[in-house]
């Protein structure tokens, strides 16, 4: 019986597969030698492979446009990138090269957008979808953007009271708005209805009483977002059709309404056995909208998506060395890695998110069941189950091996830096690892560079105030 780690993977999944292969017994990521990167940069490091971002945008745009053309759909498709998923300049800049639109979530997002305009990476024709709770500062910046000539700015109202706050700042100008529909959550949720958005049974009344007679307001969009994602399930299609019916009823009394926003929600691969039919789901979305609008005699809307995790998730990885192994009882073996999992992939412990976990080397070794532990002192700093609660298996190695075992968590490009607070104070003062970026030059050759070195002790002590003079 074959017991090597390679045999385990080959017998369990299709391998090699997109993004993962072996070269000289070392794992590659999108054709990039991880052995080369480890020797050049050491561990731990975070890796961003920028070409994958472009690939994901093109894939979604191509599938939607093919479905639109195949069904003679009259509306257009608009791909928006939601900046909250990953704010780094090299990530947002890569998305903008694909002519995406942007979705913002807070006041500071607009300062980011202004910087991108100053550098010429976006124009005043770029569509800006303003989501999130509208603080006074956020509203004021949105209104100022409109005055500066960002004519395609749409402020999506999250609740009824936001309209009054908007009007108090608007002056005599007009503005494009959207309405967000609150969804009913799935049965296992801690609450019944999302706190985000306006109740579905209040939207028509709200429009008639507060929007329709105000010439300063141009209703352009109905927005909804299902947190569990776009899935071929009774729950998703139920919320989808609820939003579609509200769009149709609104359209009958609001000629300016011309867009429906599906929010985010396309899944990404979080295990090697992942399957999802993107083409089928996109076709069903387009066909359902077209049929419902045709039956009611209203124009088909433009379709917006705000894909964040789908856009950048599969571009990211974090690479560790195994520092030590500890056999704590007869059944539990621990591999201790050279940073904190809580700090670097916080979704793994906070919402039990799963990522693709693979060794970089030692694929010919026998495998064993292991738990992965970080170097913080926290009980929760561990990772010990794959998707569907499967156990974690990794190659065995001898403590006397000259080369350590290297591990990679893959498809970590979305939210992990934002949630962990990259560059800030970390649990146990364990520093943020260096960030390595992979891109292609104009000739198509791969280039790699350090975007940010590992956080220094001076950085942390400065934040904590230890380099400040005491005031008397």
Image (spheres, helix red, strand yellow):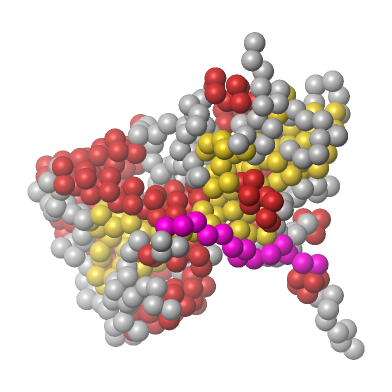
Q: Quadrant of the C terminus?
A: bottom right
Which quarter of the picture shows residue 210?
A: bottom left
390 to 115, vertically: above or below: above
Task: Tell me: 284 left or right of 9.
Answer: left
Q: Residue at x 9, y 48 (%)?
A: 297
| Range covered by the magenta-colored residues | 444-457
Q: Where residue 84 sits in the image (x, y, percent)?
A: 50, 60
The answer to whether residue 276 of the structure is visible from this angle is: yes
The reply to whether the magenta stretch includes residue 174 is no
Furthest residue toward left: 297
The answer to whether residue 325 of the structure is visible from this angle is: no
Query: Which residue occupies the foreground of this view, 94 or 243?
Result: 94
Which quarter of the picture shows residue 100?
A: bottom left
Furthest residue toward top: 1
Q: How many marks?
A: 0
Furthest residue toward bottom: 472
Q: Residue at x 53, y 36 (%)?
A: 21
Query: Which residue occupies the foreground of this view, 82 or 430?
Result: 430
Furthest residue toward right: 472
Q: Residue at x 39, y 82 (%)?
A: 144
Query: Which residue occupies the foreground of this view, 455 or 236?
Result: 455
Q: Where residue 309 sits in the image (x, y, percent)?
A: 47, 50
Q: Quadrant of the N terminus?
A: top right
Which quarter of the picture shows residue 214?
A: bottom left
11 to 414, vertically: above or below: above
Query: Which residue occupies the foreground of this view, 292 or 56?
Result: 56
Q: Where residue 22 sits in the image (x, y, percent)?
A: 56, 35
Task: Tell me: 468 left or right of 74.
Answer: right
Q: Residue at x 19, y 65 (%)?
A: 256
Q: Where residue 429 sits in the image (x, y, percent)?
A: 80, 59
């Amino acid at each position: 019986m074959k017991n090597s780690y390679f045999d385990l993977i080959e017998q369990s999944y299709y391998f090699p597969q997109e993004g993962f292969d072996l070269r000289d017994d070392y794992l590659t990521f999108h054709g990039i030698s991880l052995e080369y990167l480890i020797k050049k940069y050491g561990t731990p490091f975070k890796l961003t492979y920028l070409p994958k971002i472009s690939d994901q945008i093109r894939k979604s745009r191509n599938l939607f446009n093919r479905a639109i053309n195949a069904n003679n759909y009259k509306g257009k498709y608009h791909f928006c990138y939601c900046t909250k998923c990953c704010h780094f300049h090299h990530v947002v800049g890569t998305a903008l090269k694909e002519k995406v639109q942007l979705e913002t979530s807070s006041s500071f997002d607009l300062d980011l957008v202004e910087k991108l305009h100053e550098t010429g990476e976006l124009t005043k024709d770029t569509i800006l979808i303003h989501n999130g709770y509208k603080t006074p500062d956020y509203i004021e910046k949105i209104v100022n953007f409109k005055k500066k000539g960002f004519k395609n700015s749409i402020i999506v109202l999250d609740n009824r009271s936001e309209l009054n706050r908007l009007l108090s700042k608007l002056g005599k100008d007009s503005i494009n708005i959207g309405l967000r529909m609150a969804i009913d959550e799935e049965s296992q949720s801690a609450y019944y209805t999302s706190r985000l958005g306006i109740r579905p049974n209040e939207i028509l009344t709200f429009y008639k009483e507060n929007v329709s007679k105000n010439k300063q307001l141009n209703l352009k969009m109905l927005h909804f977002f299902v947190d569990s994602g776009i899935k071929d399930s009774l729950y998703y299609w139920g919320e989808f059709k609820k939003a579609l019916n509200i769009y149709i009823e609104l359209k009958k009394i609001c000629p300016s309404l011309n867009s429906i926003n599906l929010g985010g929600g396309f899944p990404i691969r979080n295990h090697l056995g992942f399957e999802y039919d993107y083409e089928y789901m996109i076709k069903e979305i387009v066909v359902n909208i077209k049929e419902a609008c045709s039956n009611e005699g209203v124009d088909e809307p433009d379709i917006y998506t705000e894909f964040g995790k789908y856009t950048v998730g599969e571009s990211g990885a974090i690479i560790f060395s195994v520092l030590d192994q500890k056999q704590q009882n007869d059944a539990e073996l621990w591999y201790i890695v050279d940073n904190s999992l809580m700090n670097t992939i916080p979704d793994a412990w906070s919402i039990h998110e799963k990522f693709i976990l693979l060794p970089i080397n030692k694929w010919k070794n026998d495998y064993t069941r292991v738990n992965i532990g970080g170097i913080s002192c926290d009980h929760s700093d561990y990772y010990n189950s794959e998707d569907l609660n499967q156990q974690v298996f990794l190659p065995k190695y001898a403590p006397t091996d000259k080369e350590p075992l290297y591990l990679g968590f893959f498809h970590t490009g979305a939210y992990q830096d934002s949630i962990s607070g990259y560059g800030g104070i970390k649990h146990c003062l364990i520093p943020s690892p260096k960030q390595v970026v992979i891109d292609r030059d104009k000739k198509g050759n791969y280039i790699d560079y350090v975007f940010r070195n590992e956080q220094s002790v001076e950085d942390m002590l400065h934040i904590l105030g230890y380099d400040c003079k005491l005031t008397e």
